[in-house]
Amino acid sequence: MGILADRREQRRRQALAERYLDAVLHDPSAEEVSWLVQASGASEELALIELAFSQKAIGLIVAERDALDDQTAADVSHAIDAIVAREARVRRGVVEEWHAHLAEYHDALQTRGRAEPPLRRIARVLLRRCGVAEPQPDQLARAERLVTTFRHAANDALREAFGVASLPEDRPPSALLRERTGRG
């Protein structure tokens, strides 16, 4: 491929990532914000910020885990970085906050040896970030439903924007991996 073709492909992939994020990132409902404020005692502003960070983190995690290729996650990460950079022009410390949030969400997923499902661990992060260190079972269940909704929306948007993997019925995924990489 030439330089122009590479640039066109890069712009195409970036447009897909932006379309994906447009579908994933949305203003939380008044009900979601109200519940989080009531459950945590956080301000409405903090609840809005935490819900936005949660959507970004879950959107990126879905792209990292469920995308058809590694480049998709990189494209989504670059698109999120651009969003965070725009937000940083309005509110100081956003970039550092984003990195801290993302690290905490990734750490929650990497925790092994706990019987707790990954989305419940992510729900704990959301609640902890709003000031609830030890959530009640009903708070945790509601937060888990909320992040599960975010994840399902992200999965749907990922398939819509980037497509669905398809293999011939007579070939396992490991055979395709072996052909592409020589490993598997």
Image: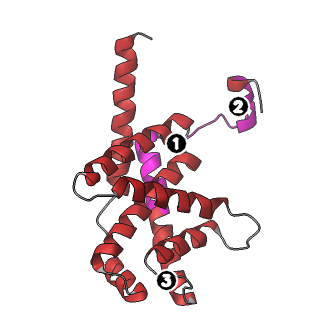
Q: Position of residue 80 (x, y in %)?
A: 38, 47
Q: Secondary structure at mark 1?
A: loop
Is tag 2's residue or tag 3's residue first in the polypeptide sequence?
A: 3
The quarter of the rendered structure image containing the N terminus is top left
The residues colored magenta run 151-179
The quarter of the rendered structure image containing the C terminus is top right
Is tag 3's residue or tag 1's residue first in the polypeptide sequence?
A: 3
Q: Nearer the viewer, mark 3 or mark 1?
A: 3
Q: Residue at x 35, y 75 (%)?
A: 47
Relative to 81, does residue 104 appear above or below in the rendering? below
Q: Is residue 105 visible?
A: yes
Relative to 138, does residue 144 appear above or below in the rendering? above
Q: Is residue 160 magenta?
A: yes
User: Quadrant of residue 179 in the image?
Assistant: top right
For the residue pair 107 and 172, the one nearer the viewer reads as: 107
Relative to 86, does residue 178 appear above or below in the rendering? above
Q: Position of residue 127 (x, y in %)?
A: 48, 77
| Amino acid marked by disc 3 | Val
Q: Residue at x 77, y 67 (%)?
A: 113
| Amino acid marked by disc 1 | Val
> Would you name the residue on which mark 2 appears?
177
Q: Residues within 10 Å of mark 3 (few under 14, many from 20)?
A: some
> Would you name the residue on which mark 1 appears?
164
Q: Position of residue 157 (x, y in %)?
A: 42, 51
Q: Is residue 69 visible?
A: no
Contact (Cβ within 8 Å) of mark 3 with mark 1: no
| Amino acid marked by disc 2 | Leu
> Would you name the residue on which mark 3 appears?
132
Q: Residues within 10 Å of mark 1 (few under 14, many from 20)?
A: few
